[in-house]
Image (cartoon, grey):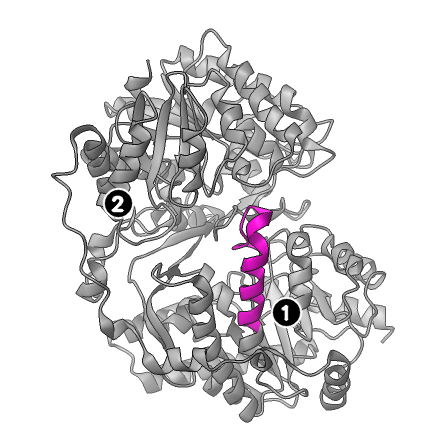
Amino acid sequence: MSTAFGQSTVLGYPRIGGNRELKKAVEAYWAGRIDAAVLDETAAGLRAEVWQTLRNARLDAIPSNTFSYYDHVLDTAVAVGAVPARFARLGLSELDTYFAMARGVEAEPAMELTKWFGTNYHYLVPEIDADTVFAANPVKALGEVAEAGRLGITTRPVLVGPATFLLLAKGADPFARLDDLVEVYAQILTVLAAAGVTWVQLDEPAYVADRTPQEIDGLRRAYTRLGSLTDRPRLFVATYFGELGDALPALLQTPIEAIGLDLVAGPGNLERLAASGPLGGKTIVAGLVDGHNIWRTDLRTAAVRGATVTALADHVAVSTSCSLLHVPVDLSVETRLDPALHERLAFARQKVDEVVLLGRAVRDGTAHLPAPLPPVPAAWRDAPVRARLDALSPADRRRGSYAVRARVQQERLLLPDLPTTTIGSFPQTAELREARAAVKAGTLDAAGYTVRMREEVQRVIRLQEDLGLDVLVHGEPERNDMVQYFGEQLDGFAATDHGWVQSYGSRCVRPPIIYGDVARKAPMTVEWSAYAQSLTSKPVKGMLTGPVTILAWSFVRTDQPLADTADQVALALRDECADLEAAGITVIQVDEPALRETLPLRKADQKAYLDWAVGSFRLATSGVADGTQIHTHLCYSEFGEVITAIDALDADVTSIEASRSKMEVLDDLAAIGYSRGVGPGVWDIHSPRVPSHDEVAGALRRAVTAVPAHRLWVNPDCGLKTRGYAEVEASLRRLVAAAAELRGD
């Protein structure tokens, strides 16, 4: 039975298209430029291209139902009928209801958005309570199976597993609904079996984190029930991003046919598997190719690990460690990378080839595998940078007392209670994108580009002054991305031309590659911040991205500890902070939205990470005077899990996404006695809706009950890059008016 799985598979593949065709089509639909039929046609073409690519690569087992218009967790919510009543009653089409859940509409704010485990992908948090009525809706999964079948391709539908789905949800004890939800999965499996589906993949990555005995028992109970169905496809339970621990023997006790283990991020899975005893004929799907980074696999080392699995299991298939959703589509289109770097990389298409090669190696041996790569070039190491790191002392990561800093800063800045500001970026208009494209094409020179960017900075400063904001930003018109912008100006980084990765919905990013030692060649932001400050008497924030986030949103070298790379980036930022301060910038924001994102999933590993993550931030920010106010920003994560680390950053002001989570972070801050400035977001910028005055004022009233007005900042959830000027101006006017109302102005 299990050998029907084949020797090679992947857990998922990028769905955005090699040229971001999905992003463009979805945004055209939102803007009313195309209808649903045209959108569906584009989507069908992208799905067919993926399936044919995988078939032509000679991959044995091909997944389906991994395509999504916005998010696969949201797709699973729809598949099990978990559409919140507040959206179901809107009377919209099924597609528009789906997008309303993701983005919100005038009548209803969107569902909460947060990070998918340790990645920069964002998922929509299911809303589950005792009143949620689950109902099987396998239409999407069936449709994709049929589409692939018309191409002569047999596929394996993929869904988020029932236990993980509920563990990711919010509401009144969602996990208590597991037995109810499992019955709906049983119905879906029965329908898929009737349609001729032979394998289904259910993803349970939540079990690589610490889980209670009750949650592990729930996993065992769920798959015992699903495995007991008489008319069902064979079940492949995929896990990834770490080690399963006690959940592995629980799964082995169930009648499922295959288990996927991440042997890249979770090498301990192999030892646990060896200690588990007989595997009952189960297929082990060995995640030997890293699906979360872009470095080529050491195929011979991976093959040795695969051989070890083969000695334990009756049948072994090779796969990626996780879905390839997290890497760019195809390296072959990157023609401008240094050949010494290019030969060390593998994007999604190349990783499929690696999986196929390893699948063959598990069966036939390693004689056909290519030779190992040569050593890392010596030129990628920077001796002065390493010497500077070696000379660091604890004093380099400390500032003066907050009480003294707060007094000096207030005397200097003269800010009111409830000071208003934004997070950094303003809308990236079509004109700005056209200017960057013209520079790249050689039709606009550097001087002309500077003129256009300065005109936009002037516009942003004048708008903020008109709105009455207290601390301004220059709007970042010159920046393509908050990480890529810095990567393009630092030694040790490389940029791709087409290396797009989905972050959420239609938002795609192009992560830079950190391949060598990091050093700053010249000031990166000073010119723009100083120019903006020259246009106004109000303080203008210098805007930097923090070292942890730069690492998290890049593809990072693996030949040295992350802590060392983070400190190299931190030294570059420390020098930038000093130059901003010397240029007269009195407020500097160093964003760390990825602080929680890269937190290890097991508590035993978290302290070591937080120590170096906090240390690198403090190294970047501790070189300024007491009178320079340091801000940081965090967004779209479960902040309660890192709340003490947020405190330990020692930033003077911390702005935090809070609108979708209804200000819940304030309780976490109060619980630890947080005593510095804080700005909980009062406007969800990832939704196109303009919040009402009452919504913003109500959020502020809730916040001011937890934080004194002299420490409470008023700001949006995040930067405004993805929004349009009309909604930005309307929303910011309400934000400023609400702050004035609470101040009694």
Location of residue 734 by image quarter: bottom right
The one nearer the camera, 369 or 24, is: 369
User: Which of these two is toward me, 568 or 11?
Assistant: 568
Identity of the residue furthest to the right in this view: 744
Q: Which mark is residue 301?
A: 2
Residue behind mark 1: 649
Q: Quadrant of the C terminus?
A: bottom right
Among the 4 quarters of the image, the one containing residue 376: bottom left
Quadrant containing the N terminus in the rendered view: top left
Image position, residue 318 (x, y; %):
30, 33
Left or right side of 641 for 140: left
Choose mark 1 or mark 2, whichever is in front.
2
The chief SS type of the magenta part is helix
Q: Residue at coordinates 67% horizontally, 39% vertically from top-left?
A: 170
Labelled pair 1, 2 in contact (Cβ < 8 Å): no
Crowd rating for badge 2 (residues with CA inside 10 Å; few <14, some 14–19, many 20+): few
Give the CA separation, mark 1 to mark 2.
Answer: 39 Å
The answer to which of marks 1 and 2 sits earlier in the sequence is: 2
Residue 158 visible somewhere in the drawing: yes
- Name the residue type under label 1: Leu
Q: Residues within 10 Å of mark 1 (few under 14, many from 20)?
A: many
- The structure residue drawn at horizontal position 79% and vertical position 60%, both measured from the top left corner, is 670
Residue 480 lies, in percent from the top left, at 41, 68
The answer to which of 361 and 223 lies nearer the viewer is 361
Position of residue 154 measured from the top left corner of the image (x, y, whole percent): 29, 22
Give the magenta part as a residue range: 596-617
Give the residue at the far top of this rendering.
230
Residue at 39%, 85% (x, y): give it. Answer: 522
Q: Visible in this render: residue 595?
A: no
